[in-house]
Amino acid sequence: MRENIHRFFRAARGAGVHVSPAESIDAMRAVAQVGFSDRTMLRDTLLLTLAKSQDEKLALGDCFDLFFSQPEPRHEQPGGGEEDPSPDADQAPPSGMASDAGGGSPQAELGPLAQMLLSQDRSAIAAAIAGASGAASLSDIRYSTQRGIFSSRILDAMGLQRLRDDLDELTATNPALAERLRAALDALREAVRDAVSQGLALYAREEAENLRNEILRNAPLARIERRQVAEMRALIRQIARRLRERYSKPRKRQRRGHLDVRRTLRRNAAWGGVPFLTAWKRKHRDRPKIIAICDVSGSVAQVSDFFLLLIHSLHEVVDDVRSFAFSSHLIEVSDILESKSPEEAMAEIMSKVGFGSSDYGSSLVDFEKEFMSTLTPQTTVIVLGDARSNNLDPRADILRRISERSKRLVWLNPEGRLAWGFGDSEMPRYATFCSVVRQCATAQQLERAVSDIVATYQ
Amino acid sequence: MAEQKPSTAIEAVESGLAAQGYIASRQIATAVYLSQQIEKPILVEGPAGVGKTELAKAIAAWRGMKMIRLQCYEGLDEAKALYEWKYAKQLLYTQILKDKLGEVLGGAQTLHAALGQLHDFGDVFFSKEFVEPRPLLQALEQPGGCVLLIDEIDKSDAEFESLLLEILSDFQVTIPELGTVSAITPPTVILTSNSERDLGDALKRRCLHLHIGFPEQRLEERIVESRVPNISQTLRRQMVGFIHEIRSLDLKKLPSVSETIDWARVLVLLQASELDTETVRDTLNVLLKYEADIEAAQPQITTFIAKAARSNVFG
């Protein structure tokens, strides 16, 4: 059973619950207290000790139900201890079982597996499968393509070789029995396949998710498929959480600057005002005020969508975000993004300004006319767009004024550097006024870009 | 306790808490039992008003132990949570003992000798007598053990969290001048959090994590029964059913158990025998704390009462 709990920890890690060695020790201690007799109690105990949040509790609960829905290899061979099948790998279980089950059976000359199959002892077969899965280290399974190899490994560990010999012998001596055995073998294969699928669901989830996320992170945002949009949103939320965790912790910077006279006096009142302990003025770290200006014309819209989602889920990290969207003219979209779900908000923004051909010049004019006063020396301005202005006047002079009034001007361009300046791209002309220009086509680049922006304030 | 079967022990916890008027679900009882067995603190999370603080009180009352409460807030620090030197007393004593000190040091001829004599006295002024214990230190010094409630830990700063780590894992604190103070009897520690901010992993790792959500209908009825005994059974069923309907709405703040109990008391005071639209409309402000929420619930009242009454018939 101890073995089983350890495998459960691995499965829990697969389900995305973080189980450190220390936690597993604690869980083992708790489990030792309550015992294994009561399943709901065991479940409660593991949930209490391992899960650290409500989400983890749900995930772990599901994992527990899935894991313990398989028969426990507890009623193993009566003689052998529980660790019997695992340590000495492949050949151990069959030989162990042979010594136990051989005895007074009618077909004593048959191998143990054949006998088990013929006697239709379901629980024994299930236990044998579980034991053999341990021997074949099923918990190492990672990819669905490994299903075949693990199935055959388990069958080998159960003594398939011996069974084949038995079958050959029987076909000659007792065809009817051989027929029965063959049918039972097919059923066994199916059972093993099910066990492997379950193992895959239990242990491989994390790996599969990591792989998928990795691919998704590096996929160009502008060209992802419709079905991936929801996954990408989840990924962006994850990124936002990571950035929040990294940058939201208030870090005090003491012992810089000047003596804080008021606090020093108060702290030293006990010594009659003699300053034994000094208090220093703390340096306040300001959080970024961000103005985001996003192109939402056809090609860039998808990237803008994800960018806005990311920047608006960074409440703890940034002080104030105001977003503007434009294609041929510019509007403020902060309220829409704050009040609606991401899907609805984007639909509304698109219906208001989307789908036009982009005109950077007139959009910048709009911005200067109405919103120039929102810029302060603390503001970081982020422009997201491909700078393709359809050969209209780019009005780079306005961008220069924006850059002069703000702390930083960052330009994120979904196009690769190679394309800048070709065709109607005005990127080189704009780039002269930007503090930073970077490519931003994938989720990973988006994360780096936003992370850098926030980090400059730390 | 150790020989007792765990399931019976957990039932004992359940009935013990029930005797104090706290109806615990199985999971809560298991957490309390485990925290006692493996000596780990419990971190209780959940929405406001589901009885997180109440749990600590009930445990203290049930075990007949003192409860020491530390309310967390932004800016809470060592001096207020752990210990402080009694500066005034130290000053006063030096003043009073001035003459005595003069006498003692009188024999010394040189400054060096005086200093040497002074060293022989040790740190008189930094001894236990001059330490003002704050809740955390108090909890460690209780000879019979106690229940230490660290309330709303999410309101404190991240630094304070790190301060707690030593206490939570080893039940000891280190005071630089005195050394390490270990607990005489390890206290039962309960931490509560409203999840206003995410707690650090280091803190979470040291605790059993218990999430108390809104109770199931039957459990909530039992809670009302124990807290407001003079309410009639039909009314109790109806009102709990009604509240469960309300919780299905999308509200700013859902009514929790404390609101249910308040409402039950109000209904008893008004001598209502059955739930009707009129009474509910008049007393809705007990349940819902935002104007917008009340407005959202108003049109649904009649439907909800009917639903609650119907579920009543079927069980």
Image (spheres, rainbow, N blue to C red):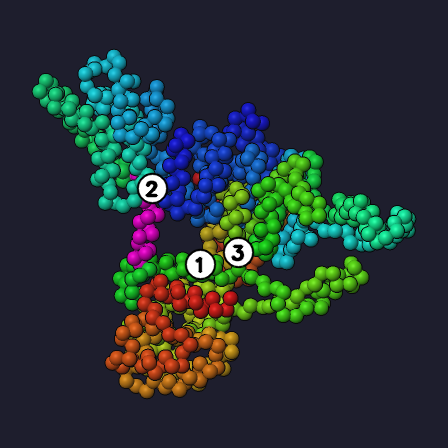
**A284, B134: nearer the viewer:** A284
Q: Helix, strand, or loop for circle 3?
A: loop
Q: Which residue is mark 1?
A: A241
Identity of the residue drawn at 55% across and 24% down? B3
Percent across and percent down for residue A338 are 45, 67
Identity of the residue drawn at 36% across and 44% down? A14
Which chain contains the residue that carries disc 1?
A
> Is A201 contained in the magenta span?
yes
Disc 2 residue type (three-letter):
Leu
Specify whether residue A371 is in view. Answer: yes
User: Of marks 1 and 2, which one's residue comes earlier in the chain?
Assistant: 2
Disc 3 residue type (three-letter):
Arg
A250 horizontally vs A136: left or right: right
Residue A421's image quarter?
A: bottom left
| Dot 2 alpha-carbon crowd within 10 angstroms: few under 14, some 14 to 19, many 20 or more | many
Q: Which residues are magenta?
A: A198-216
Q: Helix, strand, or loop for circle 2?
A: helix
Q: Which residue is mark 2?
A: A202
A235 horizontally vs B73: left or right: left
**A178, B274: nearer the viewer:** A178
In the drawing, what numbered circle is on residue B197? 3
Which chain contains the residue that carries disc 3?
B
A209 horizontally vs B111: left or right: left
Specify whether residue B311 is in view. Answer: no
Percent across and percent down for residue A80 are 34, 22
Identity of the residue drawn at 69% across and 35% down? B144
What's the CA distance linking mark 1 and mark 2?
Answer: 26 Å
Please determine whether, in this image, residue A283 is positioned above or below residue A391: above
Identity of the residue drawn at 51% across and 78% down? A377
CB-based contact (under 8 Å), mark 2 and mark 3? no
**A400, A73: nearer the viewer:** A400
